[in-house]
Amino acid sequence: MSAKASAPHAVDGPARTRNRSVAVAVAVLAAVAVWSGATLAGAQLTVDQGSGPQDVPVLAVLMTSALAALLGWALLAVLERFSARATTIWTGIAVAVLVLSLLPALLVDASAGTRFTLVLMHLVVGAVVILGLRRGARHA
């Protein structure tokens, strides 16, 4: 067995891009799945942020989850260029952002079911993004 075969290595080039693209797509699909499940179960996903009740549309779920995943990818790519500990640093930042993202979902004026659904969407997207983008990241 060669040293190369036994040493852990990062995925490079097109494979890394494919893995990360899949992570973004899965994160978006997971958020839509949670939204769909709640909607099919009869939940009224409505929040009031001070300007009156507003529905949480699937388009907002799609756009927000895609934006969060793509920003995570961009930050990881920048960190990989400048730090040998990029994955560790990025993971810490990603977990902190996930935790902070839960606060508005918990504090928004909405029913308990809507709050639960929002928190679940955040957790699902966060888990998929964190685990998916770490896969194949460059390691020191």
Image (cartoon, helix red, strand yellow):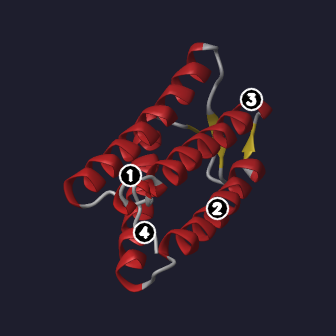
Give the structural element (helix, strand or loop) at label 2. Answer: helix
Residue farthest along the top direction in this orientation: 41
Amino acid type, callout 4 = Leu
Q: Is residue 89 visible?
A: yes
3 or 4: tag closer to the N-terminus:
4
Identify the residue under disc 4: 76
Which labelled disc corresponds to residue 113?
3
Of tags 1 and 3, the one toward the viewer is: 1
Residue 125 % position (x, y): 54, 44
Residue farthest along the bottom direction in this orientation: 82
Circle 3 crowding by C-alpha within 10 Å: few under 14, some 14–19, many from 20: some
Residue 55 % position (x, y): 55, 35
Residue at 44% of width from left, 59% of height from top? 8
Of tags 3 and 4, the one toward the viewer is: 4
Quarter of the image holding residue 117?
top right
Circle 1 crowding by C-alpha within 10 Å: few under 14, some 14–19, many from 20: few
CA–CA distance in space, label 3 to label 4: 33 Å
Identify the residue under disc 2: 95
CA–CA distance in space, label 2 to label 4: 13 Å
> Camera-side residue: 33 or 52?
33
Which labelled disc corresponds to residue 1?
1
Query: Are the residues flagged by discs 1 and 3 in contact, CB closer than 8 Å?
Result: no
